[in-house]
Image (tube, rainbow, N blue to C red):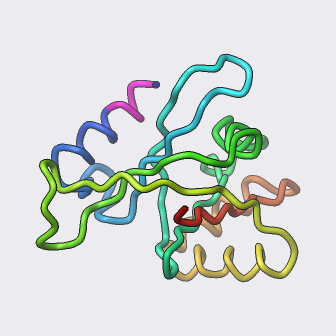
C-alpha cells in the first residue's frame, strides 16, 4: 500500500469511517482487492456512493490516462470485501463494518446514469473526466453478497 493510501486507511479506521484529510468526510469505502499479477492483498480507499444495498465506485484515478490497478483486480476477482462506516449505534469495536460484496462493471446506459450520480455528488469528477479523455472512466457497483 502506498503512503497516501495507508494514511487514509489509518484515519478511516481510527475515526469510525470519517476522513478529514482532503475533506473526504464520510464518503469513503476501503475496497479490498488482490493483485491480479502479484497475488498480494491490497486496500484502495475510494469514494463510495451508497445506493440501496450497493455502493458505486469510479475508476477515475484522478483523471489519469489509464485505469487504476484496483479496477483490473476487481474484474479478475469480483468477490471481495469493503469496509464502510458502521451505522450510528452499531455494536462495533472501531465503528467500521466489513461487508462482503461482488463487483459489477457497469456498461452503457447503466454506467452513464451512475456516472451522473458521481458528478452530482462530487463535481470534481467532471475535471477527472476531462483530464482522462478520451478514456471513459469505468463505474463499478459493489453489491452486498
In the rendered image, which quarter is residue 13 located in?
top left
As rendered, which of 126 and 74 lies closer to the eye?
A: 74
Relative side of 85 to 115, left or right: left
Residue placed at 73% from the left, 20% from the top?
37
In the rendered image, which quarter is residue 125 located in?
bottom right
Task: Give the residue furthest to the front.
Answer: 145
> Which secondary structure class fits the magenta region best?
helix
Task: State how many labels appear.
Answer: 0
Q: Quadrant of the C terminus?
A: bottom right
Residue placed at 44% from the left, 46% from the top?
45
Magenta extent = 2-6
Residue placed at 57% from the left, 20% from the top?
40
Residue placed at 31% from the left, 34% from the top?
7
Residue 34 lies in magenta, yes or no? no
As rendered, which of 22 and 28 lies closer to the eye?
A: 28
Q: Position of residue 91 (x, y in %)?
A: 13, 62
As rendered, which of 144 and 29 lies closer to the eye?
A: 144
- Residue 123 against residue 85 in the figure, above or below: below
Relative side of 41 to 105, left or right: left
As rendered, which of 82 and 79 lies closer to the eye?
A: 79
Q: Position of residue 81 (x, y in %)?
A: 49, 48
Q: Position of residue 28 (x, y in %)?
A: 40, 58
- Residue 55 against residue 81 in the figure, above or below: below
Q: Position of residue 39 (x, y in %)?
A: 64, 20
Amino acid at each position: 500500500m502506498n503512503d497516501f493510501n495507508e494514511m487514509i486507511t489509518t484515519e478511516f479506521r481510527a475515526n469510525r469511517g470519517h476522513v478529514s484529510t482532503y475533506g473526504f468526510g464520510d464518503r469513503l469505502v476501503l475496497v479490498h482487492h488482490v493483485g491480479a499479477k502479484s497475488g498480494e492483498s491490497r486496500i484502495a480507499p475510494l469514494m463510495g456512493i451508497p445506493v440501496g444495498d450497493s455502493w458505486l465506485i469510479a475508476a477515475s484515478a484522478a483523471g489519469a490516462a489509464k485505469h487504476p490497478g484496483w479496477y483490473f483486480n476487481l474484474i479478475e476477482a469480483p468477490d471481495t470485501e469493503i469496509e464502510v462506516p458502521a451505522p450510528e449505534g452499531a455494536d462495533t469495536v472501531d465503528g467500521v463494518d466489513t461487508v462482503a460484496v461482488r463487483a459489477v462493471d457497469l456498461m452503457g446506459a447503466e454506467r452513464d446514469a451512475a456516472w451522473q450520480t458521481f458528478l452530482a455528488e462530487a463535481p470534481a469528477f467532471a475535471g477527472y473526466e476531462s483530464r482522462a479523455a478520451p478514456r471513459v472512466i469505468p463505474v463499478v457497483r459493489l453489491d452486498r453478497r
